[in-house]
Image: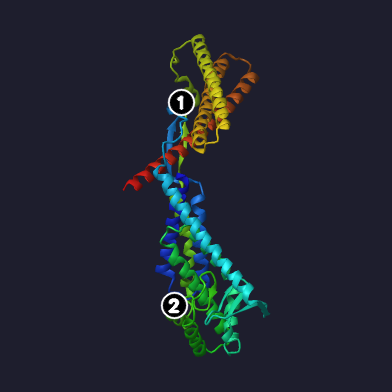
């Protein structure tokens, strides 16, 4: 649950920064195609970037192998939870809000479908024309154009259809659906609402330019915008002829496109995306076994450089016996946890058992790493007594293999520990924020 909240906060912050950049730098430019691409890219990046899990090239955490604890994880308390915590309440509020906006989205789609079914459709210039009875209702949704019946015999019908044709051909309805999905996910984000308006304004600018490009009189088209703007209420889900503010639409009709290098300003989204990737990157973990893996293995209690070969072999054997015993107990606990997990249907208890199983599996990796360290020490002792060059070369090859396996186990252990520490830190931060 804490991972979900962390994702939502990162996603919301990403959208807030990217949209703020659009408002400050790009909004007044007349490169509407680039602006549309920037807004769509902002939505995609805000949803996708927080899901990336990469290691930071700048921050490194160095951990000595000897610092890794080697102790059995206790079994968790399997008692049912006493009550709902703050995170549970927060999660319920978020789900309720997301469900509400999703239902509203479906209701709007259903309203359009019902209107098309009641009024009927006529095909014209590749479009499905729905003749509505409401004054001023002229808008499109995918291949459907909803047209006011009073305008059918007017001279402005072709201009309106050209405008709506631009919406259809440029797939503006897909943008609208994406914005609605973004609203469902980030309904709590205050930046998502002006983002939707800006995206629809850009659609209108693009469609207006398409009409003017067809040879329509600029003065006559401005008058048509005013007439349509005074009309009835527009359905929120559709691409409409009167969506954006009338003054800005008329002003943008005469605004010249930005020339030169300035027209490539939307490409600044790329360095912004890289900055977010680095901001969300996790610290890179490096496990250092010490001066050498062999030396780390020999650092176990009872071993020293002055210890005789026989004494060293005895201590190593004792250590291996202890590890075997721990390995056996660990396997028994895993089996017990698995049995309890399968015998209960309470999701909270299952979550606690799953957490304990994760700890036991982590313990298995630690044991595997220690086993290979001891095997390396034993092999080192055998190599010191070996005179056969071929046999000694084989032992050296085996030593390198054990070293690689040990380091691999340690890296896996530290990765899992890092993920767990990050999760607990996020939960603690959330709880602190909720108390404030």
Compare residues 364 and 144 and report the one nearer the observer.
144
Q: Which of the two labelled residues, at mark 1 and mark 2, occupies the earlier sequence position?
A: 1
Seen at 44% across and 41% down, the residue is 423
Q: How many marks?
A: 2
Residue 111 pos. (x, y %): 57, 69
Estimate the x, y position of residue 228 in percent, counting from the top left. Answer: 50, 83
Q: Which residue corresponds to mark 2?
A: 245
Residue that label 1 marks:
74
Question: Residue 112 vs residue 298: left or right?
Answer: right
Nearest the eye: 60 or 227: 227
At 51% from the left and 49% from the top, the residue drawn is 52
Q: Position of residue 226 (x, y in %)?
A: 47, 85
Residue visible at 50% across and 75% down in the picture: 234
The outermost residue toward the front is 118
Q: Residues within 10 Å of mark 2 (few under 14, many from 20)?
A: few
Secondary element at tag 2: loop
Locate residue 406: give its quadrant. top right
How has the structure been colored for display? rainbow
Looking at the image, do the residues carrying marks 1 and 2 touch, with CB atoms under 8 Å apart?
Answer: no
Q: Position of residue 34 (x, y in %)?
A: 51, 70
Residue 134 vs 16, above or below: the answer is below
How far is disc 1 from disc 2 in space, using C-alphas?
A: 64 Å
- Residue 384 visible in image: yes
């Amino acid at each position: 649950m804490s991972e979900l909240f962390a994702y939502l906060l990162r996603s919301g912050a990403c959208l807030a920064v990217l949209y703020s950049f659009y408002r400050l730098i790009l909004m007044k430019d007349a490169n509407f195609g680039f602006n549309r691409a920037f807004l769509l890219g902002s939505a995609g990046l805000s949803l996708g970037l927080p899901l990336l899990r990469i290691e930071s090239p700048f921050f490194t955490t160095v951990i000595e192998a000897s610092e890794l604890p080697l102790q059995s994880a206790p079994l968790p308390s399997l008692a049912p939870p006493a009550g709902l915590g703050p995170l549970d309440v927060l999660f319920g509020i978020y789900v309720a809000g997301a469900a509400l906006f999703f239902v509203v989205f479906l209701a709007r789609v259903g309203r359009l479908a019902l209107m098309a079914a009641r009024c009927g459709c006529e095909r014209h210039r590749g479009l499905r024309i729905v003749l509505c009875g409401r004054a001023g209702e002229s808008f499109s949704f995918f291949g459907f154009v909803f047209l006011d019946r009073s305008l059918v015999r007017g001279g402005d019908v072709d201009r309106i259809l050209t405008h709506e044709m631009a919406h259809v051909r440029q797939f503006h309805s897909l943008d609208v659906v994406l914005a609605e999905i973004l609203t469902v996910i980030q309904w709590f984000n205050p930046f998502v609402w002006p983002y939707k308006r800006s995206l629809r304004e850009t659609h209108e600018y693009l469609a207006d330019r398409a009409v003017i490009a067809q040879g329509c009189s600029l003065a006559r088209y401005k008058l048509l915008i005013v007439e349509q703007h005074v009309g009835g209420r527009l359905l929120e889900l559709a691409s409409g002829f009167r969506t954006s503010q009338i003054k800005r639409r008329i002003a943008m009709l005469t605004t010249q496109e930005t020339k030169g290098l300035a027209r490539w300003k939307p490409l600044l989204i790329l360095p912004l995306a890289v900055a977010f990737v680095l901001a969300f990157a996790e610290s890179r973990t490096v496990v250092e076994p010490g001066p050498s893996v062999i030396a780390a293995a020999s650092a176990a209690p009872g071993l020293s450089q002055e210890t005789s070969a026989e004494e060293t072999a005895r201590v190593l054997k004792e250590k291996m016996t202890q590890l075997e015993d721990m390995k056996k107990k660990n396997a028994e606990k895993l089996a017990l946890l698995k049995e309890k997990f399968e015998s209960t249907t309470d999701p909270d208890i299952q979550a606690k058992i799953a957490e304990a199983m994760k700890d036991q599996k982590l313990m298995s990796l630690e044991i595997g790493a220690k086993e290979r360290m001891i095997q390396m020490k034993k092999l080192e002792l055998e190599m010191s007594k070996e005179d056969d060059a071929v046999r000694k070369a084989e032992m050296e090859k085996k030593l390198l293999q054990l070293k690689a396996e040990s380091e691999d186990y340690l890296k896996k252990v530290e990765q899992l520990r890092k993920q767990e520490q990050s999760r607990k830190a996020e939960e603690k931060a959330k709880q602190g924020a909720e108390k404030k």
